[in-house]
Image: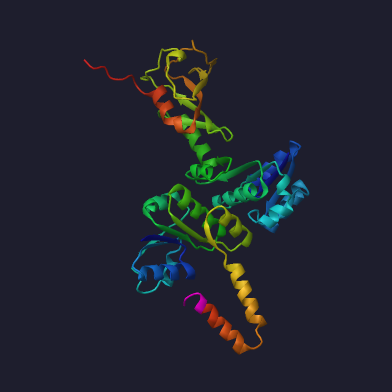
Amino acid sequence: MYIIVIGGGKVGFYLAKELVEANHEVLVIEQDPGKVREIQDELGDIVMEGDGCEATVLDKAGTARADMLLAVTGDDEDNLVSCQVAKQRFNVGRTVARINNPQNEGIFRKLDVDITVSATTAILAHIEQELPTHQLIPLMRLKGSGLEIVEVRIPDDSRVVGRPLREILLPQQSMVALVIGEDGTPRMAGGDTIVRAGDEVVAVTMHDSEEALREALMAPPPARAF
Amino acid sequence: MRIVIMGCGRVGAALASDFSRDGCDVTILDTDPAAFRFLADDFTGIRVVGNGIDPDVLRKIHLEKVDVFVSATRGDNRNVMAAQIAKHIYGVKVVASRVFDPLREEMYRNMGLRTINPTRVQARRLKRVIEAPSDEAANLMALDFLKQDGA
């Protein structure tokens, strides 16, 4: 694959290094001549000096034949514009933007960036995994479809405790893929799989159904009227 | 009319002062509080220190109730990102941006934003002034430009 990386900072550098090792054709576009030289010294002739938001620079980089463009500078607005120019002018199939402000995730998705990656969100998810809060943790977004993989820890008082998966009403286009017991043993999810308190449930769901899925798996049983 | 202007440079400040004088409800945003010095003395609008691409700031100024959003910072990318958020996330009806890079300006114009590219306009005008047969003719030309712009 021909992959263009915008931004030759730490993220861009190590990304390029890994991609080269995986035998991809890589070009890093970086504005700072000092960084350009460093990359050249370490990784060879795979770097170009210039502004990765400029159509003329992207044209020279052969963006029209790129399979993928990864915009990983430290500025969200620059990453957005690189992805949009790549899409609009050069028809790049897949654009990936690094975002720093997690709140930009939804905005970028709406503005046609295929994939967003946020270190902030990833670190927050790790913290949340360690905490006994009753949260649904997004693990991964699946390309384009609006589907994502999420993880839910089943609380003690959940209405689904002790029930087989077949009896649990999930929102549309949601399915449980895997159930991991408290001792770390994974169980393939089938209709007969019984959900226990403390289980980690890995599910696929639409982004918009996240809340409904959380409700379905985590809410306590409805109060009985006497 | 409610109008939000992002970037209180000379252009943003002049625009904000004009709209304020016209009786509009103006909010001006800049990350640098010192930038507000460019505003006219009779500016009656609201000054907000903050970044126009920060969702928290946009929520705070109630962008969903705004009629016009203008981005006129020095950064093209900041301008077009803010404009797209205003248009596509907050549904602001009229969104206009200044974009210095002609190619980027053309692209975002084609994507439905209202944009202005000062670079091309100014280069063309400067060339005409240079090519004028005399200094007097050049000065007349410059006055004519001002008149065209309604000043």
| Residue B48 location, quadrant | bottom left
The reply to whether residue A27 is visible in this rendering is: no
Q: Residue furthest left?
A: A226
* Residue plotted at (75% across, 51% down): A40
| B125 vs A121: above or below | below
Front residue (pair A180, A64):
A64
**Rendered location of residue A1, percent (x, y):** 73, 38
- Whether residue A108 is visible here, answered yes or no, is yes
Q: Is residue B105 positioned above or below B91 on the image? A: below
Q: Which quadrant holds the N terminus of chain B?
A: bottom left
Q: Which residues are magenta?
A: B147-151
Left or right: where B70 falls relative to B133: left
Report the label total.
0
- How far across and down, in percent of the image, does residue B64 sit? 38, 51
Front position in the image: A207 or A76: A207
Pinpoint residue A17: horizontal percent, then vertical percent.
Answer: 71, 42
Compare residues A47 and B143 and report the one nearer the observer: B143
- Locate residue A172, reporting x and y percent: 46, 25
Residue A103 in magenta stretch: no
Residue that extends furthest to the top in the rendered view of this protein: A192
Determine whether B79 is above or below B12 in the image.
above
